[in-house]
């Protein structure tokens, strides 16, 4: 079975950093895309970033460009979302998801499997 386990959330002050991890099992990252999404209270879930490591392609939402980076450790089957210079508006539940194609997509409908969320809270 495909499983995704997101971790690394927490409470931080604005301007600080967090690194989220998405550990995958049941598949390897070859030919897959792993994405990060977030959902703030009262808002729709939005795509934050994704990576198709086998083709070296990434995507970042405009709101996080220059602050967030994404990387994958294929040996560990884990994708990381490094979040720097966090802002209160980054507060949300963050989810990781995978799709069975090595092509970055921002839309959540393109993703087949989802992990549970991890809460990120940024205080001002």
Image (cartoon, helix red, strand yellow):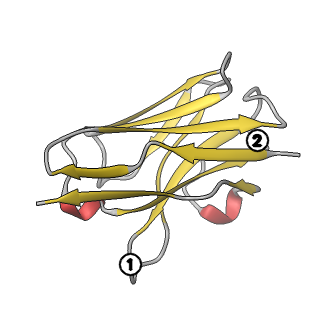
- Residue most toward the right? 1
Residue at 38% x, 71% y: name it: 40
- The picture places residue 25, in percent across and down from the top left corner, at 77, 36
Q: Position of residue 99 (x, y in %)?
A: 73, 48
The 10 Å Cα crowd at callout 1, few under 14, some 14 to 19, many 20 or more, is few
- Residue 118: give its label: none
Which residue shows up at 82% across the image and 34% down it? 27
Per the image, the residue denoted by label 1 is: 41
Mark 2 vs mark 1: which is more N-terminal?
1
Q: Nearer the viewer, mark 2 or mark 1?
A: 1
Q: For numbered disc 1, what is the local secondary structure?
A: loop
Give the spatial CA distance, label 2 vs label 1. 30 Å
Asked whether the viewer can see residue 103, the reply is no
Q: Residue furthest top?
A: 75
> In which image quadrant can residue 57 be found?
top right
Image coordinates for residue 16, horizontal then vertical, percent: 18, 41
Badge 2 vs badge 1, beta-carbon distance below 8 Å? no
Label 2's element?
loop
- Above or below 16: residue 41: below
Q: Residue furthest front?
A: 11
Give x and y (percent) for residue 93: 45, 63
Q: Seen in the image, is 72 located left or right of residue 1?
A: left
Give the quadrant of the C terminus: bottom left
Could one spot residue 98 in this view of the protein? yes
Q: Which residue is mark 2?
A: 101
Q: Is residue 81 left or right of residue 114?
A: left
Residue at 39% of width from left, 84% of height from top? 42
User: In terms of depth relative to the viewer, which is nearer, 117 or 29?
Assistant: 117
| Residue farthest toward the bottom in the current orientation of the protein | 42
Q: Which image quadrant is residue 28 in?
A: top right
């Amino acid at each position: 079975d495909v499983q995704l386990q997101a971790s690394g959330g927490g409470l931080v002050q604005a301007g600080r950093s967090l690194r989220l991890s998405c550990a995958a099992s049941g598949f390897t990252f070859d030919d897959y895309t792993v994405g990060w999404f977030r959902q703030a209270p009262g808002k729709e879930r939005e795509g934050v970033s994704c990576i198709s490591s086998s083709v070296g392609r990434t995507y970042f939402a405009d709101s996080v460009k220059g602050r967030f980076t994404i990387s994958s450790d294929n040996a560990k089957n884990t994708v990381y979302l490094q979040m720097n210079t966090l802002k209160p508006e980054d507060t949300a539940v963050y989810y990781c998801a995978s799709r069975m194609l090595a092509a970055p997509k921002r839309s959540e409908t393109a993703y087949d499997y989802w992990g549970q969320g991890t809460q990120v809270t940024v205080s001002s």
